[in-house]
Amino acid sequence: MYGAFVHEAVINSRDAFSGITIHFVDEHYDNGDIIFQAKCEITAGDTPLILAEKIHRLEHEHYPRIIEKVIHGQENE
């Protein structure tokens, strides 16, 4: 499952939160060791598009900083 299908499924399941997981990649899909996670609240009226925008904000906020830490061996700080 990917893209808008994920956001639609999360909203349909009535979860209170969604978010991002940054992880190391291994030979299995979505299976590597977790480096970092962040979440956002799902509020009444959120659509898959609105949730996608919230997720993109998390990605833009955290990916550069976390990847920089990993590159410099500081992922546990």
Image (cartoon, grey):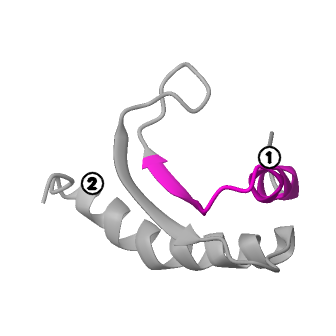
Circle 1 Cα neighbour tier, 10 Å, few/some/many (<14 / 14–19 / ≥20): few
Q: Is residue 39 above or below residue 32?
A: below
Q: Which mark is residue 2?
A: 1
Name the amino acid, label 2. Val
Stretch of the chain drawn in magenta? 4-22
Say which element carries label 1. loop
Q: Residue at x 36, y 33 (%)?
A: 33
Q: Which mark is residue 70?
A: 2
Relative side of 34 to 73, left or right: right
C-alpha span from label 2 to label 1: 25 Å
Name the N-terminal-most of marks 2 and 1: 1
Give whichever of 64, 41 is nearer the camera: 41
Residue 21 percent coordinates (x, y): 48, 51
User: Residue 67's x, y, as percent?
Assistant: 36, 60
Q: Of the residues tagged 2 and 1, which is closer to the observer?
A: 1
Farthest residue toward the top? Answer: 27
Q: Secondary structure at mark 2?
A: helix
- Mark drawn on residue 58: none
The answer to whether residue 16 is magenta is: yes
User: What residue sits 19% from the left and 58% below the top?
Assistant: 72
